[in-house]
Image (cartoon, rainbow, N blue to C red):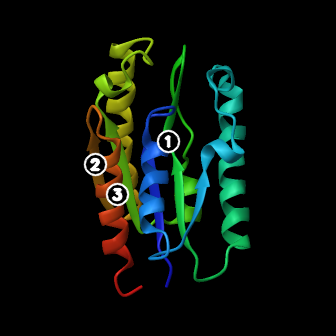
Amino acid sequence: MHMKILITGVQNSVEESIVKLALEHAEGKAKFKILSFSDFVDTGESAADELKLLKSTQKKIKDNIEMRILKSRAGDNIIINGYFTVKSKLGFFPVISRDVIDTFNPDFLVHIHVDPLALAGKLDNRKEFDEHQDIENSCAVLIGAYAGCGIKIIRSGVDGTRESADELYGILKELMVDK
């Protein structure tokens, strides 16, 4: 039996670095095939600004996940690394649709909540970041409930990338026991 894990965080935050560090730590102990949104979807603000592009972005994510899952071997453990929403001047748009969750059917969801101070100098607007992160946190709970999977929110503080990666590794290690 393989594990399917969805790992999320606010787009362009530190969650991708945390995932990479955790997987380096897991090297040789558990193999994971990682699918990052950044590998197959351009969800920059210009794309999200146009409401008509929302459905095509969601479809592109779903199609790529389906294709990559089909290409993986039956026993592969799969991590999808991404985010629930993108922000535009019109508001927030979901990039993970119900179809994506139904297709991937995660066993566990890990959401990385980043202390804005950890992104000092990288944030254009702290209030907007906090709002976006609040929406992402809410999506984590809703999508976890919809999927019927376990949920863990990792709080990554200032200079907390290594500690967060260790916490994520611990979760991956526990999930892989007897798998």
Q: Secondary structure at mark 1?
A: loop
**Looking at the image, is mark 2 or mark 1 nearer the viewer?**
2
Between the residue at mark 2 and the residue at mark 1, the CA separation in whole angstroms equals: 21 Å
Q: Locate residue 35, reporting x and y percent.
A: 61, 56
In this rendered view, identify the residue nearer to me: 90 or 177. Answer: 177
**Looking at the image, is mark 3 or mark 2 nearer the viewer?**
2
Relative placement, left or right, of 130 versus 103 is left
Q: Secondary structure at mark 2?
A: helix
Q: Locate residue 56, reporting x and y percent.
A: 72, 39
* Residue 89: quarter of image: top right
Question: Can you say whether 3 is above or below 137 in the image?
Answer: below
User: Counting residues from the N terminus, which is met first, the one under dot 3 or under dot 1?
Assistant: 1
> What's under tag 2, amino acid-wise?
Glu
Q: Locate residue 28, reporting x and y percent.
A: 49, 75
Q: Locate residue 123, reporting x and y percent.
A: 42, 17
Q: Which residue is mark 3?
A: 168
Between the residue at mark 3 and the residue at mark 1, the CA separation in whole angstroms equals: 16 Å
Residue drawn where x is 63% and y is 42% of the image = 38
Question: Can you say whether 125 is above or below 140 in the image?
Answer: above
Between the residue at mark 3 and the residue at mark 2, the CA separation in whole angstroms equals: 9 Å
Q: Which residue is mark 2?
A: 163
Q: Which residue is mark 1?
A: 83
Q: Secondary structure at mark 3?
A: helix
> What's under tag 3, amino acid-wise?
Leu
In this rendered view, identify the residue nearer to me: 98 or 168. Answer: 168
> What's under tag 1, amino acid-wise?
Tyr
User: Counting residues from the N terminus, which is met first, the one under dot 2 or under dot 1?
Assistant: 1
Residue drawn where x is 66% and y is 49% of the image = 61
- Whether the residues at callouts 3 and 1 have beta carbons within 8 Å, the answer is no
User: Counting residues from the N terminus, which is met first, the one under dot 3 or under dot 2?
Assistant: 2
